[in-house]
Image: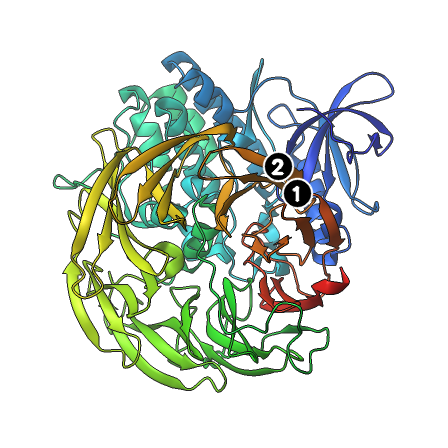
Amino acid sequence: MALRDSDPAEAGGYRIEDRLGSGGMGVVYLARSASGRRLAVKVVHGQYADDDEFRARFRREVAAARQVSGAFTAPVVDADADAPRPWMATLYIPGSDLGTHIRENGPLPLPRLRDLAAGLAEAIRDIHRAGVVHRDLKPANVMLADDGPRVIDFGISRATEFAASDVLTQTGRVMGTPPFMSPEQFSAPQDVGPAADIFSLGAVVAFAASGRGPFDSPSPYETAIRVVEGTPELDDVPAELLPFIRLCLEKEPKSRPTADELLRLLKDGDWPPSNDTPPPTATGRPRRRTRRWLAAAATLALAAAATTTLALSGDDPAPGKLPAGWTQWHKRAKDPSLDKDPIGAGGPFRRCVAVGGTSLVCAGDDILATRFALADGRNTWGLPIDGTADDIGGSSSAGTIIGTRGGRVYAYGSDDRTTGSGDGTTVTRHTVQALDAETGKVIWKTVTGDGEEAVEPSSDHGASIAVPEGIITAYGKQGEQFALVGAEDGEVRWKQRFPEPDKQNCLLRTAARQGYLVCQKWSGDDAVGSTSIAQLDPATGRARWTLRVAGDKDIVGQTGGRLIVLGTTGEHRTLTLVNATSHVLTTVRLSKAQPEGSTPTLLRGRLYFTLPSGGVRAVDPRSGKQLWQSDSGVEQAGPPTASATRLYLASVSGRLAVLDLATGAVEATLGGRDDGGTVDFPDMSAPPVLAGDALYIPYGIRSVHTVDVSRL
């Protein structure tokens, strides 16, 4: 990977030769020591260097990596957590990581699988003997060295003896990579112990044997459900390794063997029976449902999905003007929880919207909605997503703004309550609500689902959309229907059933104020074989027309009377235009392929592909021509916002880049802020909100800051 002009010539005195990769928190370089030894040097992004909590996390990563340095990891050579930009140098391990190797070469043959299983068990044994829990064992963190696998990246590890008192992990925030996380990382992240690494080990070996994870699903939200409740899919795993993997994938941590026990079992072959046997009637996909433990999983869904974003707009001041009485401000929302012992704030807002010329209303991190005054940031009201004072823990949902209309905001609530069974089981009542943006008064509240399998009506998950007639939302005890809730009174106008729920996953989408149902149908090999797109009649909910396209597709938006449809996985080489009236399809080849992992957003008739590295590419959807390519300098930016002449991108740290809409040139930047707290998932940024010349940037933990863009 070529070096960039912005890359340093050295780090910690080590000469940099190449760029090995970039992530949310830093860049990894190939470097040379004075003696010529090759090193992998991780350098923290500048936007996190002034964050005291992040520095503490980095010190812990260095300490953990030093503790476990040995034959099965990448030994630490040098580090400085107090440098202006903290860095750590480890011995460079030539070779590819397991994930890249499997993608390029397919599953490992049985002899190599045996070696991998034994090597990883040895590595985990040594890590646990050093008193460390890795917590993020995944294919990308397993290097295939010539002498066996090496486990790398201890960025979210922690010492076992400090697990209960570790203030950096007591926030209840989930940490890890969903397809390879253990059930307890979702349900009780503060109680994660060595058994979590054993679960991840089993998932990694299953991936190496089959080319896919045992709980893979289209979204992290669905994946979390399968990890906690589902049966692993192990059809392509060699029979010899099934007992090993099934023991690792036991749902209960106490039922999993230790690493030492795994090594003995691998040697002796005397496997005990596993409790994780598939039920005889298990067919199809698990239904979408919500639980308290899915709060974090729901958050991850937005963080990881390279899908579309609905830009919400309200009654904003005209361009060239600031809201009346505006002054520059930054504020954090008050905690509206009704519980006597609330969990507290832990994440960023998912969505903010300017309403009525005086209000900025935001939602997310268990806040149903909260208002800041556009002028001075006064936080005048807030409502919790769980409106019941029951002290049974966090809600099952994160919260978002579904839509706005005439001074009203439409959001959703999720009230958890115990079933009374005595085993701590909870059920959830989901509601869609209309709120007065100025006062926070609930104008109406409609129950959309009540029960263990009721679906959270979040627009971020494709379970609700705003249309002129009201809110179309998932509906029913199991989310088996979708219904229109009237905008004025909250009455249910009609209900329709989701088609073939056991064979396909359906999402509600909107484009140009029109509702659509997008259904991805599973093929026999558990991949998406085709996608149907149906335009919904707002009067009845029935399909006006339906068309089917190959592969996994989704709607990005509409421009010039045509829907823009893109693939949801892999590189973007083509896009599909669908005439919204005649539903005639046209395939457009992109002049330059857009990378996997880029996020498409449609603004003012153009597609903007944003990359985690900070890259931005503008594409004309009618011709497929790439108009420009730029580096915003904002890594892990959220969806952009556009004025008539500028594109605005911001990260969860509050960092901002302003690009010329015509050329992509970076016109201005603002550094990140250190007063919003640190969130564990830096790629969860909400889009900034433009109200006249005032730009409102959600950042940190439930925080917003604002700037006059005419001065940038």
Question: Can residue 252 be seen here?
Answer: no
Instruction: Give the vertical position of 182 relative to 374 (above or below).
Output: above
**Where residue 660 appears, x then y in whole percent?**
67, 48
Relative to 411, is 570 above or below?
A: above
Distance from label 1 to label 2 (Cα)?
A: 6 Å
Q: Amino acid at mark 2?
A: Trp
Across and down, in percent, residue 60 comes to 69, 47
Q: Label 1: few (<14), some or many (≥20) within 10 Å?
A: many
Residue picked out by circle 1: 664
Q: Secondary structure at mark 2?
A: strand
Residue at disc 1, secondary structure: loop
The label shown at residue 628 is 2
Q: Is residue 394 left or right of residue 649?
A: left
Count neighbours of disc 2 (C-alpha within 10 A) and say few if under 14, some if 14 to 19, many if 20 or more: some
Looking at the picture, which amino acid does disc 1 mark?
A: Gly
The quarter of the rendered structure image containing the N terminus is top right
Disc 1 and disc 2 in contact, CB within 8 angstroms: yes
